[in-house]
């Protein structure tokens, strides 16, 4: 059974969902998808059962659930992640992060000292390209685009334009899992971080066999 869990943070609060009403494991996986995505997406919803059956507690974090859209910034999201980690750090022996898609520099800007391992699913690697090359301007608004256009606000745009290369913050805790059809794995030439490409998969890993392979590769990293 999955329940709502509310964690107060300063003037706002964030709400996310946890699989178990009572803690059943000393290992927790936090699943995150930034940049306006629904945590009911199949690769989040299905993961909770897979990993709970493998004796992990699971937790789906929604960075956008209870915050004004104009207050969505990389800084705020990094702080939300830190608050979430701090809330759980004394409740679990091991905590893991699994992030999907392109907005993962939020992790690199947050304090993740209590995180044991981190899995990035289909991100681009070069953070300067990731952030700045995706920006497009049209009259009075700015949007980020790869597979769909998403409007972002002035605060976030200004942050993106000032963030430098964060790649040197990647360490041995990370594993990168790429979908083959997106060709984002072309960035791999410049890294020694553990990585793998799942054949015949797209960014959302829609096919059941891709999804299962995605689960297995993540499990192999954190087991």
Image: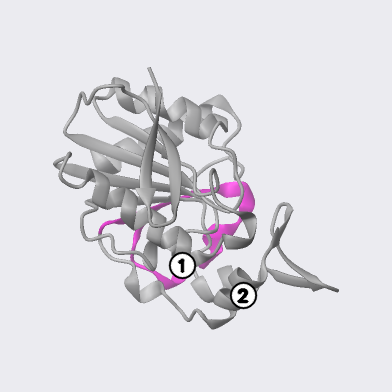
Residue pointed to by mark 1: 75
Cα–Cα gap, marks 2 and 1: 16 Å
Above or below residue 137? Residue 77 is above
Please provide the residue range marked out in magenta: 173-194
Q: Residue at x 31, y 39 (%)?
A: 29
Quarter of the view holding residue 168: bottom left
Residue pointed to by mark 2: 132
Query: 80 and 96: which one is in front?
Result: 80
Question: Looking at the picture, how far across and down is residue 120, in whole percent?
Answer: 42, 52
Query: 57 and 165: which one is in front?
Result: 57
Q: Is residue 216 left or right of residue 204?
A: left
Above or below residue 117? Residue 44 is above
Q: Is residue 151 left or right of residue 28?
A: right
Observer able to see residue 75: yes
Callout 2: few (<14), some (14-19), or many (20+) C-alpha neighbours within 10 Å?
some
Residue 22 numbered tag: none
Q: Residue at x 60, y 78 (%)?
A: 158
Q: Residue at x 61, y 49 (%)?
A: 36
């Amino acid at each position: 059974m999955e329940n709502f869990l509310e964690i107060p943070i300063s003037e706002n609060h964030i709400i996310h969902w946890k699989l178990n009403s009572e803690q059943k494991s000393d290992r927790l996986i936090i699943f995150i998808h930034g940049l306006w995505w629904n945590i009911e997406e199949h690769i989040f919803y299905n993961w909770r059962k897979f990993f709970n059956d493998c004796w992990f507690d699971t937790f789906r974090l929604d960075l956008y659930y209870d915050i004004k859209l104009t207050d969505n910034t990389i800084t705020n999201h990094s702080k939300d992640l830190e608050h979430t980690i701090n809330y759980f750090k004394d409740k679990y022996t091991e905590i893991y992060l699994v992030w999907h898609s392109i907005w993962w520099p939020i992790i690199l800007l947050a304090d993740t000292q209590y995180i044991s391992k981190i899995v990035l699913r289909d991100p681009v690697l070069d953070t300067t390209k990731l952030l700045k090359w995706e920006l497009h301007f049209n009259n009075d608004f700015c949007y980020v685009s790869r597979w769909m256009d998403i409007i972002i606000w002035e605060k976030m745009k200004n942050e993106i334009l000032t963030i430098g290369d964060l790649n040197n913050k990647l360490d041995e805790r990370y594993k990168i899992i790429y979908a083959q059809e997106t060709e984002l794995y072309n960035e791999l030439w410049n890294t020694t971080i553990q990585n793998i490409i799942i054949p015949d998969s797209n960014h959302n890993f829609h096919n059941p066999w891709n999804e299962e392979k995605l689960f297995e590769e993540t499990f192999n990293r954190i087991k």
